[in-house]
Image: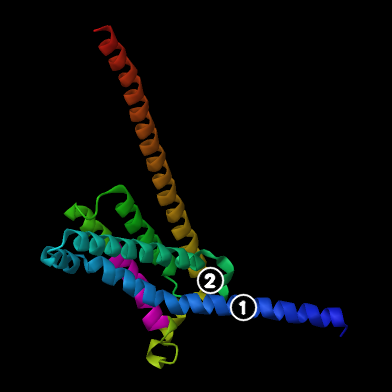
Amino acid sequence: MKPDQVATAITQALVQGGAQWLVATIVAFLPALWTMTLILHLGRPYVLRTLRRCGLRLGADIWWMSYLLMRDAVLLLTFALSWIFFAPNIVMNAALPITGPLAALCLLIALAVKLSRRVDDDVQAYRLATTFLVVGATLYYGALVFAVEAASQDYLAGFGQFFTSNMNPTVALWIMWISLAGVAIVAGWLFVRLLASANRTMASRLSTQQVRPTTEQTSAVQ
């Protein structure tokens, strides 16, 4: 082989190896993120009980804001890393939970509930977000534990072959595309809602600015 061919082969090997290492790292880290997401969300009653025991108002505010930032940041990070379930090549070639895209969709819906409703003040909204998070975690952990991580168990061979993405690529791709369509719908709904909220805020500010000059003119005449 010529030197340039050797260099090209080494570069391609490094790129492919790095990509595979990155995917493997994300897949290995996602269970910890899902667990942290559930713990922080379901730990809200404990945080509220702790707040009631805080005698210092500043300490209670810092504790509550830190909890909110950690909870929502972990949820966003989990969804961001779950985007690998929407890459067709990765889904077909890597051993991923076949229901991973559905779990990511449930995670996005829970996030949409948090963005559109006051989850920390509305019990019904909190229960709705909890339902989607629990369903998403069940879809993710079920396929991960009993399919991807149970490849050495002979009595789970059939379950593992069906619920592992690279062993059942046709169904995995169908689930991925359907979930991706659901993500697009939820994202579009959030965009429309955000745009409507921005328009209402702008209209309110304009009306306030128009009322002030009129009030000032009336006061000057009087």
Residue 94 placed where, x, y %? Answer: 54, 77
Residue placed furthest toward the right: 2
- Is residue 131 shown to the viewer in this render? no
Q: Residue at x 76, y 80 (%)?
A: 9
Question: In the image, which disc is placed on residue 18?
Answer: 1
Residue 49 placed where, x, y %? Answer: 13, 66
For residue 90, side relative to residue 103 (left or right)? right
For residue 9, side relative to residue 158 (left or right)? right
**Quadrant showing the C terminus:** top left
Q: Residue at x 27, y 72 (%)?
A: 39
Residue toward you, 43 or 133 = 43
**Quadrant showing the N terminus:** bottom right
Residue toward you, 106 or 221 = 221
Q: Amino acid at mark 1?
A: Gly
Q: Check whether the beta carbons of the residues at disc 1 and disc 2 lie within 8 A of each other.
A: no
Residue 103 placed where, x, y %? Answer: 38, 66
Q: Mark 1 or mark 2: which comes first in sequence?
A: 1
Residue placed furthest toward the top: 221
Q: Residue at x 28, y 16 (%)?
A: 215
Q: Which residues are magenta?
A: 132-147
Q: Quadrant of residue 71?
A: bottom left
Residue toward you, 152 or 129 = 129
- Is residue 15 shown to the viewer in this render? yes
Q: Amino acid at mark 2?
A: Val
For residue 89, side relative to residue 4 (left or right)? left
Q: Residue at x 31, y 21 (%)?
A: 212
Give the CA separation, mark 1 to mark 2: 17 Å
Residue that badge 2 annotates:
91
Residue 41 placed where, x, y %? Answer: 26, 66
Please state the total of marks drawn on the protein image: 2
